[in-house]
Image (cartoon, rainbow, N blue to C red):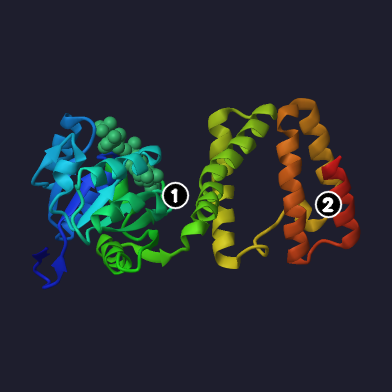
Amino acid sequence: MQTIPDGRIKPRVAIVGCGIVGTAMGKLLSDAGYRISGVATSNVETARRAAEATGSERFSDSPWEVTQGAGVVFITTPDDLIESTCKRISELRGFEKNAVVIHCSGALSSGILSSARECEAVVATLHPLQSFASVDQAVRLVPGSFCAIEGDKNALPIVRQIVKDLGGIAVEIEAEKKRLYHAAAVAASNYLVTLVHLALELNKAAGLPKDTSFNALYPLIRGTLSNISAKGIPDALTGPIARGDVETVSAHLEAIEKDAPALLSLYKCLGLYTVDLARAKGTLSKDAADRLVVLLRA
Ligand SMILES: NC(=O)c1ccc[n+]([C@@H]2O[C@H](COP(=O)([O-])OP(=O)(O)OC[C@H]3O[C@@H](n4cnc5c(N)ncnc54)[C@H](OP(=O)(O)O)[C@@H]3O)[C@@H](O)[C@H]2O)c1
């Protein structure tokens, strides 16, 4: 433990897995006054660079060498390696009694860290709800981001404090609901990319050049996000399905079948979901909704 200038006691932190999130967490916590006592990753040269970036006292390619003496251990390896990495550290008695062992995966729960309890450590997860492509971007984006947390009762107060010190906003979630929570994040982030790609492919079939196509769609995408933020869903929904323009939707399906047939089933599937939203908005008559469902299911 160490006392920092604002008078609070902060635990020493070890980071295992020095990629984007591990290095960014180390930098942000170091800036917030935590002492990074050690960093480890499978490549010792990467570990040395991460030690430099985070001001860490030690670096190693053997995690258990840097976790001893740490009050908080972040295991920020790829998801598939978190459980085995934690087990190996536990077997070698690498966790201190009462240390808080944390991973940052969105879909996995703190249950995969249970081997740390053999060292009388406590376990938790802290998932920043963001998409990071680089360390610098993560350092910029974590402050202000929501962070889903769950774990042992004794671990949560320190995890909440860490989120606060990172400049994030902590939201508690049940361990068994994390997969659904992460599916929601995938829908909002990854599938938004998929939707934009669908629109670009349709524009390509319509003969629009690629650059023009994205530039034309971007203000529409931003405007829609702004409407969702201002009005919520379903009120932000506009367009032919919300209006009940059955002939327009029918014309879309005919044109897609002719010029971009591979996209037809996805377009119909999204259309059916949208009919339900339009019903909830209350702008679609029962007759138009029934005809749209027949059309989109065909
Ligand atoms: N990136 C995101 O957008 C994001 C957002 C939220 C949460 N997360 C979560 O954050 C965690 C880390 O993700 P990331 O994006 O930072 O991944 P990443 O950039 O691929 O970093 C993982 C690092 O782990 C190291 N590593 C691999 N095997 C190891 C081992 N056996 N022991 C120790 N270190 C090992 C690798 O470095 P070396 O090969 O050099 O050892 C690699 O740089 C994951 O749980 C992920 O789900 C990521």
Judge whether residue 132 can be spotted in this image: no
What residue is shown with label 1? Answer: 108
Judge whether residue 283 can be spotted in this image: yes
Locate residue 134: give its quadrant: top left
Q: Nearer the viewer, residue 46 or 269?
A: 46
Q: Tell me the quadrant of ligand 1.
A: top left
The label nearer to you, 2 versus 1, is 1
Indicate the position of residue 247 as horizontal and vertical percent values.
Answer: 87, 46
* Lower position in the chain sequence, tag 2 or tag 1: 1
Indicate the position of residue 190 as horizontal and vertical percent values.
Answer: 52, 43
User: Does the beta carbon of the residue at mark 1 sit less than 8 Å from ligand 1?
Assistant: yes
Q: Nearer the viewer, residue 296 or 95?
A: 95
Residue appearing at x 71%, y 46% in the figure: 270
> Is there CB contact under 8 Å for labels 2 and 1?
no
Three-letter code, disc 1 = Leu
What residue is shown with label 2? Answer: 245
Residue appearing at x 32%, y 57% in the figure: 123
Residue appearing at x 16%, y 61% in the figure: 11
Q: Rate crowding at label 2 as few (under 14), some (14 to 19) or many (20 or more) other CA atoms within 10 Å.
A: some
Q: Is residue 298 left or right of residue 71?
A: right
Q: Rate crowding at label 1 as few (under 14), some (14 to 19) or many (20 or more) other CA atoms within 10 Å.
A: many
Please tell me whether mark 2 sits on a helix, a strand or a loop. Answer: loop
Indicate the position of residue 174 as horizontal and vertical percent values.
Answer: 48, 63
Three-letter code, disc 2 = Asp
